[in-house]
Image: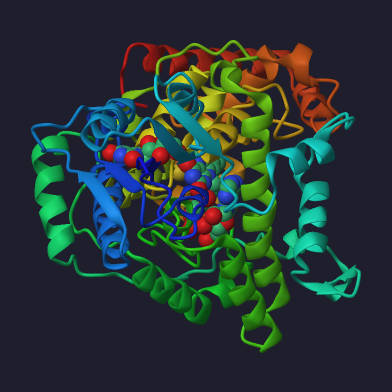
Amino acid sequence: MTPRLVLVLGDQLTPTVAALRKADKTRDVVVMAEVADEAGYVPHHPKKIAFLFAAMRKFAGRLQDEGWRVAYTRLDDPENAGSIGGELLRRAEEFGASEVIATEPGEWRLIEALRDHPLTVHLLEDDRFLCAHSEFETWAKGRKALRMEFFYREMRRKTGLLMDGDQPEGGQWNFDHDNRKGPPKGLAGPMPSRFDPDPVTEEVLALVEQRFGQNFGDLRPFWFATDPDQANHALDDFIDQALPRFGDYQDAMVSGQDFLFHSVLSVYINAGLLDPLEVCRRAEAAYRAGRAPLNAVEGFIRQIIGWREFVRGVYFREGPDYCARNVLGHSRKLPPVYWGGETQMRCMKEAVGVTRREAYAHHIQRLMVTGNFALLAGVDPAQVHEWYLAVYADAYEWVEAPNTLGMSQFADGGVVGSKPYVSSGNYISKMSDYCKTCAYGVKVKTGPDACPFNLLYWHFLVRHRDRFASNPRMAQMYRTWDKMPEDRRTVVLDDADHVLARLNAGDPV
Ligand code: FAD
Ligand code: DLZ
Ligand code: SF4
């Protein structure tokens, strides 16, 4: 029988992924390829590329050990066609194949490339998620607005996670109000598990250094897990050492503490090294054994079966044009500070710093520092989206785009969130120690020393008054603004314009 090609992409490194389940070991050829198109469609952080290539090579080795025929193309292979589509054509000719079995990619551009491919491509739904496309559609259909909280309850019922019969464990679905503690002095979290690069990884590091060394981000020290055993080790360590305090300090930010009590597991879950449901079950077991409190475990599980599944549902339901949305009409260029340019803002320095070092920042840094600043400053959401897609090791469009364009930039007009996540410096001051060492004064509301968040916050509200004034969750802020003396309001807006002019000129803020 003629072989079929079985495509396994860099974020499909799961032995039971749909395409492999459908394939026949005795007949088919697994195709995996490191290609310039995937490595270059945004300027990915070198750690992200190295993680994926090392994990891909190790996964291919494992498949071979299990008896699969694997056609693996390295980036520096002179025959490399440069794209997934091109590699499929080349391998089809080599093996006399005309059909491809593929698991649906997590980005529309690649789905479209496979749908339009000259070979016959059988696209199978990626069922490594709890909620199939049809199930999300059934849930979403007819609702005026999609809200994560209600979706999440469905997922709790479906999985039985943290359920007490048909009621939520502890009598509440959501313990978020317990999870907003600011950091006490000296708060420090454990280090996530780190792994010395093995020979496969070392070879990849040399390649990435040579080919992508100019990209934004530090390649070394490289410490990510690159196979399921290591990723499971990281999960165990997280559950033992960080999960118990995950809830309390989920929103906290501390200078020099890059991870606090976060899991740093998204990079492994999204590439397929860890199964999301298994991760949640292990966290639940820690709660049941009295090793972690309910607010921590519920908060953690909600991120995975709630937010993660919800944003994926939105990405696929909204369709390929989602990434072009810009309902607020923002058009400012992404300021150089995002690529490590000079800044006086301590919070931006910290959030961009950890991003550069680790291809990581935790949720509140992404949402309330870099995201908040871009939104207040009116940066073109497409450029913001491209930045997040490039700089984080866990970034693929299905999860990054709804978080960035939806949750963070409100570019989708409220599909993901009911109101924009904007705040003045006060929020950052409450949740971090950043303001204590900042050149700006978080309590200063006007003038050259005023925290830029304070100025831009009002500027944002004023320029989008027509859209947001009637939003009940924002009405209070407009009342506060309206009560301010007229001359003060003028000064605030003039000072904000001055900050924006500096951004326009490419000057540091
Ligand atoms: P933890 O805080 O330990 O959370 C546990 C797990 O929950 C994570 O590993 C992740 O799998 C899941 N999770 C938490 N929040 C979310 C969320 N909002 N959406 C989806 N899953 C979530 N997450 C990505 O995986 N890839 C991205 O490209 C990405 N881009 C983002 C862009 C912006 C602007 C924002 C605001 C958030 C983004 N997130 C993204 C969500 C979130 O910030 C990361 O999942 C989280 O910071 C990963 O770190 P962690 O594993 O330590 O998470
Ligand atoms: C992100 C990425 C990178 C950097 N390189 C590759 C690659 O060379 N080969 C590959 O198969 N996948 C890579 N990926 C992951 C894909 O971009 C990812 O599968 C799609 O974006 C869909 O989520
Ligand atoms: Fe950030 Fe403003 Fe605080 Fe400085 S004062 S760290 S700019 S929030």
Give the image location of residue 60, x and y in percent.
28, 56
User: Which quadrant, please, contains the C terminus?
Assistant: top left
Give the image location of residue 418, x and y in percent.
77, 33
Q: In the figure, residue 508 lies in which quadrant?
A: top left
Give the image location of residue 391, x and y in percent.
35, 39
| Residue sitting at the far front | 1
Q: Residue sitting at 61 percent across and 52 percent down?
A: 129
Report whether residue 366 is seen.
Answer: no
Give the image location of residue 132, x and y in percent.
69, 45
Q: Tell me: 13 left or right of 399.
A: left
- Count the marks: 0
Q: In the figure, residue 165 lies in which quadrant?
A: bottom right
Q: Residue sitting at 74 percent across and 15 percent down?
A: 465
Q: In the figure, residue 460 lies in which quadrant?
A: top right
Q: Is residue 203 above or below residue 365?
A: below
Question: Which one is nearer the viewer's eye here, 15 or 192?
Answer: 15
Report whether residue 355 is seen.
Answer: yes
Question: Which one is nearer the viewer's eye here, 3 or 339?
Answer: 3
Q: Quadrant of ligand 2?
A: top left
Its colouring scheme is: rainbow
Q: Residue sitting at 67 percent across and 54 percent down?
A: 130
User: Which quadrant, please, contains the N terminus?
Assistant: top left
Question: Which one is nearer the viewer's eye here, 397 or 105?
Answer: 105
Q: Tell me: 461 left or right of 11.
A: right
Q: Is residue 483 above or below residue 309?
A: above
